[in-house]
C-alpha cells in the first residue's frame, strides 16, 4: 500500500513524500536505508493532497518550467536522475510539486522508468512531455531533451501571457460597462421613474425603453441569470459535439483579425511541438498524431491527422501538407526544405518563431482596433442613457419656468 511519510535528511531538512510498503514498519526501514529519519508515517487517505491535487493545488506553468530547467542542469552536471529528483524535492516550495516528485522518485526506485512515472500525472505532464522523455531515455540525451522541453514551455507561456495581456484592457472595460448598466437599471432608473410618475411628466421613447428594461431586469433577474447559465451550459454541451466544434471553429477561423490570430497561434504551436517531437527522436507519424492532439481547432487537428495517414502511406510531410489550404505556402516550403536537408526540426523551429512574430503583430493590431471600437460603443451607450434621463428632467425645468 502507499504510505505518506515525513522525515529528516542528513542535512536536517524536512522531507515529505509517498512510499509503497506493506506496513509502517517496512516503510520506516526503507526510509532509514535512504539515510532518512522518519517522523511520521500514515496511510495515504482519500483526503490526501495527491488525491485532491487537481482541485486545491494545481501545478502552475512556472513550476513545471522551473522543474524541467533545474532537472536538465543537474543531469547535465553528472548527477543521476534519482539524485537530481531528490535534491529538487528538497528545494521545491509548492506542496503539490513535492508530492509529485516524491511519487516519481519512489516509482523509479521500484524499477519504473521516468516516463512511466510521469504518466500518473496527466494534469501535470502532457503526452508530448512524456513522449519526449521516453524517447530521450533510449537515446541517452535526457539533459538535452529537458532543455528543449524547458525552452518550449517558456515559449508557450510567453505566447499565452502576451495574448492575456492584450485582452486585459478590453475585458476590464466590458466588465465596467456591464457593472454600470446593472447599477443604472436596478438603482438609478427606478428612482427616476418614481420621480417622473409623481410629477406626471410625459416620457419620450428612449426613456420609456429604459424604464421597461429596468422593470424587466428587476422583476425577472433570477430568470435572466438562470437563462444565461442554461445558455452557457447548452453551448458547452453543443461545442463538445463534432457538429458544434465544426461550426464554432469554422467561425473562429473566419472572424476578421481575430481569425487570423487563431491561425497564426495554431501554426506556431503546431510547428514548435512537431519540431520538438521529431528532434527528440520520435517517429514522424507518431509525432504528427501527438501534435494533432495538442491542437484546439478541429480543422487543423483533422488536417494534421490526415497528413499523418498520408505520411504513413509513403508521402512526404511537405507534399501531404500542400493539399490543405490551412497550411500556408511558407510552412510547406520550410517543411520540404527540412526534409531534403534532414533538419526538419530546425526548419519547424524557425517556422514557429515566424508565426509567433506574426501573432505579436496581429495582437498589436487587434488591441489598437479594439480600443476605438469599445470607446464608440461605450460612448453610444452612455449617450443613450443620458438622453433617456436628461430629456424628462429638461421638460420638468421648462414647465417650471
Image (tube, grey):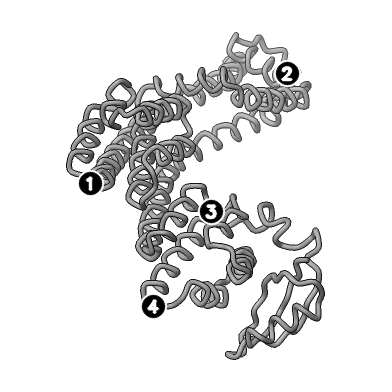
Single out the mark in the foreground, 3 or 1.
1
Residue denoted by label 4 = 78
For the residues labelled 3 and 1, the Cα–Cα distance comes to 27 Å
> Could you say which quadrant of the image residue 307 lies in?
top left
Upstream in sequence: badge 4 or badge 3: 4
Upstream in sequence: badge 4 or badge 1: 4
Furthest toward the front, the residue is 314
Mark 3 in CB contact with mark 1 (< 8 angstroms): no
Q: The N terminus appears in which quarter of the rendering?
A: bottom right
Residue denoted by label 1 = 343
Upstream in sequence: badge 3 or badge 1: 3
Upstream in sequence: badge 4 or badge 2: 4
For the residues labelled 3 and 2, the Cα–Cα distance comes to 49 Å
Q: Nearer the viewer, residue 348 or 95?
A: 348
Q: Nearer the viewer, residue 65 or 386?
A: 65
For the residues labelled 2 and 1, the Cα–Cα distance comes to 64 Å
| Label 4 neighbour load within 10 Å: few <14, some 14-19, many 20+ | few
Upstream in sequence: badge 2 or badge 1: 2
Callout 2: SS: helix
Residue denoted by label 2 = 216
State whether residue 103 is above or below residue 293.
Answer: below
For the residues labelled 4 and 1, the Cα–Cα distance comes to 29 Å
* Direction from residue 94 to residue 343 in the image, left or right: left
Mark 4 in CB contact with mark 1 (< 8 angstroms): no
Q: Position of residue 399 (x, y in %)?
A: 61, 13
Mark drawn on residue 125: 3
Amino acid at each position: 500500500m502507499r504510505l505518506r511519510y515525513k522525515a529528516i535528511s542528513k542535512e536536517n531538512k524536512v522531507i515529505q513524500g509517498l512510499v509503497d510498503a506493506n506496513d509502517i514498519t517496512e516503510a520506516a526501514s526503507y526510509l532509514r536505508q535512504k539515510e532518512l529519519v522518519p517522523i511520521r508515517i500514515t496511510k495515504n487517505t482519500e483526503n490526501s493532497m495527491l488525491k485532491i491535487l487537481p482541485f486545491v493545488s494545481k501545478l502552475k506553468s512556472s513550476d513545471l518550467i522551473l522543474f524541467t530547467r533545474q532537472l536538465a542542469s543537474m543531469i547535465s552536471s553528472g548527477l543521476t536522475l534519482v539524485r537530481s529528483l531528490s535534491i529538487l524535492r528538497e528545494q521545491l516550495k509548492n506542496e503539490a510539486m513535492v508530492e509529485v516528485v516524491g511519487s516519481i522518485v519512489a516509482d523509479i526506485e521500484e524499477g519504473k522508468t521516468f516516463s512511466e512515472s510521469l504518466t500518473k500525472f496527466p494534469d501535470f505532464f502532457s503526452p508530448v512531455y512524456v513522449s519526449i522523455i521516453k524517447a530521450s531515455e533510449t537515446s541517452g540525451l535526457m539533459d538535452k531533451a529537458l532543455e528543449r522541453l524547458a525552452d518550449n514551455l517558456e515559449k508557450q507561456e510567453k505566447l499565452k501571457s502576451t495574448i492575456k495581456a492584450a485582452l486585459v484592457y478590453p475585458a476590464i472595460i466590458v466588465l465596467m460597462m456591464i457593472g454600470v448598466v446593472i447599477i443604472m437599471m436596478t438603482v438609478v432608473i427606478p428612482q427616476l421613474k418614481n420621480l417622473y410618475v409623481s410629477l406626471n411628466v410625459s416620457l419620450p421613447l428612449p426613456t420609456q425603453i429604459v424604464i421597461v428594461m429596468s422593470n424587466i431586469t428587476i422583476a425577472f433577474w433570477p430568470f435572466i441569470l438562470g437563462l444565461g447559465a442554461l445558455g452557457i451550459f447548452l453551448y458547452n454541451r453543443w461545442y463538445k459535439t463534432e457538429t458544434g466544434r465544426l461550426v464554432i471553429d469554422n467561425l473562429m477561423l473566419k472572424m476578421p483579425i481575430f481569425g487570423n490570430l487563431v491561425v497564426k497561434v495554431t501554426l506556431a504551436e503546431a510547428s514548435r511541438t512537431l519540431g520538438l517531437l521529431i528532434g527528440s527522436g520520435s517517429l514522424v507519424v507518431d509525432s504528427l498524431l501527438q501534435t494533432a492532439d495538442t491542437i484546439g481547432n478541429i480543422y487543423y487537428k483533422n488536417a494534421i491527422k490526415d497528413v499523418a495517414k498520408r505520411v504513413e502511406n509513403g508521402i512526404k510531410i511537405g507534399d501531404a501538407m500542400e493539399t490543405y489550404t490551412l497550411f500556408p505556402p511558407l510552412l510547406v516550403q520550410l517543411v520540404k526544405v527540412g526534409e531534403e536537408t534532414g533538419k526538419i526540426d530546425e526548419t519547424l523551429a524557425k517556422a514557429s518563431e515566424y508565426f509567433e512574430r506574426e501573432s505579436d503583430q496581429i495582437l498589436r493590431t487587434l488591441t489598437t482596433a479594439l480600443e476605438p471600437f469599445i470607446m464608440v460603443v461605450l460612448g453610444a451607450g452612455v449617450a443613450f442613457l443620458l438622453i433617456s434621463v436628461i430629456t424628462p428632467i429638461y421638460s420638468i425645468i421648462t414647465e417650471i419656468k
